[in-house]
């Protein structure tokens, strides 16, 4: 067998999605963002909607998402992605519009924009990366930081009397009349990646069916902020994050 036979397209096992650019990843080793970027690109290619998709990225680790996915993007001020996406979708209702936000962005600085966009039932998809910390700006405590979890601004661990309880904002959004699909996923195993991919695709499909807002929370790791190896981060996430933020659908109508 010669090399031409080996590289025959019929023998292809895996190929990087054409929606992803060849930009070297800037994310930390083991970061969940890279996996999520990849599956978003795969979904867009498989659905054949590359020229019909618009992403909105605010401030945070995902601020450079436009470098990796070859679709139209709009930058938003910190926390304001759902408001920007609302304007885009109302002006261009034939486009698949999604936001890509971290927990510090969606659940803190953008709490108002997130809740009101979901309450109005805007026909957008929200991809919500929850790693329990402000990853880009120095590992500060976020609304989603767990009780007792250490960060640069809670070096002795989060205490409830001082900082309050972790914010389960996805549960809050599931109770709003304007949301149609609310789910919590992860990307730490092959099985989890497949489930997450199906969830994001469903959220994008919903955005074109006038059902309302779809939210896909992805419980993720932050190896740098957590001061752990990628493997240890995955184990810690399963043991500590999953009990507070359990996997599965919270709403599906």
Image: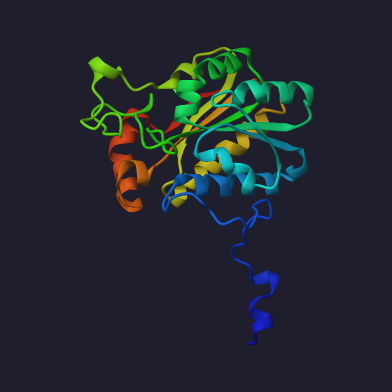
Residue at point 71% right, 43% down?
71
Q: Quadrant of residue 203?
A: top right
Residue at point 75% right, 32% down?
95
Q: Position of residue 202 (x, y in %)?
A: 61, 34
- The answer to whether residue 123 is visible is no
Farthest residue, direction left: 156
Applied colour scheme = rainbow
Residue at point 65% right, 26% down?
124
Looking at the image, residue 238 sits to the left or right of residue 76; the answer is left
Residue 26 to residue 6: above or below: above
Q: Nearer the viewer, residue 140 or 96?
A: 140
Residue 61 to residue 86: above or below: below
Q: Quadrant of the C terminus?
A: top right
Looking at the image, residue 113 sits to the left or right of residue 159; the answer is right
- The answer to whether residue 163 is visible is yes
Q: Quadrant of residue 135?
A: top left
Q: Quadrant of residue 142?
A: top left
Q: Position of residue 108 (x, y in %)?
A: 45, 22
Residue 166 to residue 12: above or below: above
Q: Nearer the viewer, residue 113 or 185?
A: 113
Q: Nearer the viewer, residue 135 or 54?
A: 135
Q: Position of residue 60 (x, y in %)?
A: 50, 35
Q: Position of residue 139 (x, y in %)?
A: 36, 36
Q: Quadrant of the N terminus?
A: bottom right
Looking at the image, residue 133 sits to the left or right of residue 71; the answer is left
Residue at point 24% right, 32% down?
155
């Amino acid at each position: 067998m010669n090399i031409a036979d080996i590289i025959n397209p019929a023998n292809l096992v895996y190929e990087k999605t054409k929606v992803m650019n060849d930009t070297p990843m800037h994310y930390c080793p083991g970061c969940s963002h890279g996996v999520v970027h990849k599956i978003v690109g795969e979904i867009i290619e498989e659905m054949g909607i590359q020229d019909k998709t618009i992403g909105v990225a605010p401030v945070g680790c995902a601020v450079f998402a436009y470098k990796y996915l070859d679709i139209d993007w709009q930058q938003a001020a910190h926390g304001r992605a759902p408001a920007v996406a609302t304007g885009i979708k109302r002006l261009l209702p034939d486009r698949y519009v999604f936001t890509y936000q971290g927990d510090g962005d969606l659940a803190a600085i953008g709490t108002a924009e997130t809740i009101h966009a979901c309450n109005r039932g805007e026909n957008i998809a929200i991809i919500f990366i929850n790693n329990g910390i402000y990853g880009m700006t120095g590992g500060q405590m976020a609304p989603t930081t767990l009780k007792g979890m250490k960060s640069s601004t809670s070096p002795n661990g989060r205490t409830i009397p001082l900082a309050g309880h972790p914010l389960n904002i996805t549960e809050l959004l599931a109770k709003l009349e304007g949301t149609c699909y609310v789910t919590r996923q992860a990307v730490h195993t092959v099985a989890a990646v497949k489930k997450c991919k199906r969830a994001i695709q469903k959220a994008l499909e919903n955005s074109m069916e006038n059902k309302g807002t779809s939210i896909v929370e992805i419980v993720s790791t932050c190896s740098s902020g957590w001061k752990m190896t990628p493997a240890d981060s995955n184990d810690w996430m399963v043991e500590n994050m999953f009990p507070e933020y359990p996997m599965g659908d919270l709403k599906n109508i």
